[in-house]
Image (cartoon, grey):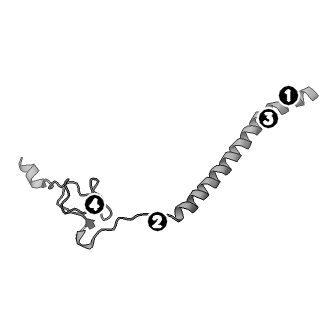
Amino acid sequence: MLKTLLVIAIGFLPSLFSLWMIRKTHLRTRLRMRQAAINFSGVRVRQIRPVEGDRYYLEGVGYLIGDISCKFNAESGYIRCAVNPSGPCQGCRHYEPKELAAREHRA
């Protein structure tokens, strides 16, 4: 009977050790995440703000920023384009005029 209990106890030891390690890892991860959140709250995030002259209102779409005639314009109120997201659009070396839908149908 004593041997049976000893075998059962030894059989449970790896599972108990594993659960202890998992709990310890979760607590450590939670502590690191809390510390990262505290550290991040002190950092100022740089926000890209559109220049008022760079902002357009398009009926049915809303506010857009950047040169809306450019092929790369994101047609968004938050980002100009993937090529030059912070702008300015004037003098951008990546500017390409948009192809109009009417031109595409004629060709």
- Three-letter code, disc 1: Val
Q: Position of residue 99 (x, y in %)?
A: 13, 53
Task: Give the spatial CA distance, label 2 vs label 4.
Answer: 22 Å
Element type at mark 2:
loop
Task: Give the spatial CA distance, label 1 vs label 2.
Answer: 58 Å
Element type at mark 3:
helix
| C-beta proximity under 8 Å, tags 4 and 1 | no
- Three-letter code, disc 4: Arg
Number of callouts: 4
Q: Which residue is mark 4?
A: 80
Outermost residue, bottom direction? 52
In the rendered structure, which disc, 3 or 4, sits on the residue that comes first in sequence? 3
Can residue 1 be seen by looking at this rendering? no
Q: Specify few, some or many for label 4: CA neighbours under 10 Å numbering under 14, 14-19, or 20 or more.
A: many
Mark in front: 1 vs 2: 2
The dot on residue 7 is 1
Query: What residue sits 76% from the left and 34% below the top?
Result: 14
- Three-letter code, disc 3: Leu
Q: Which residue is mark 2?
A: 44
Task: Give the spatial CA distance, label 4 vs label 1.
Answer: 69 Å
Task: Give the spatial CA distance, label 3 vs label 4.
Answer: 60 Å
Query: What residue sits 5% from the left and 49% below the top?
Result: 106
Report the side of 20 relative to 1 (left or right): left
Mark in front: 2 vs 4: 2
Query: What residue sits 28% from the left and 70% below the top?
Result: 51
- Three-letter code, disc 2: Arg
Q: Specify few, some or many for label 2: CA neighbours under 10 Å numbering under 14, 14-19, or 20 or more.
A: few
Q: Which residue is mark 3?
A: 13
Task: Give the spatial CA distance, label 2 vs label 3.
Answer: 48 Å
Q: Specify few, some or many for label 1: CA neighbours under 10 Å numbering under 14, 14-19, or 20 or more.
A: few
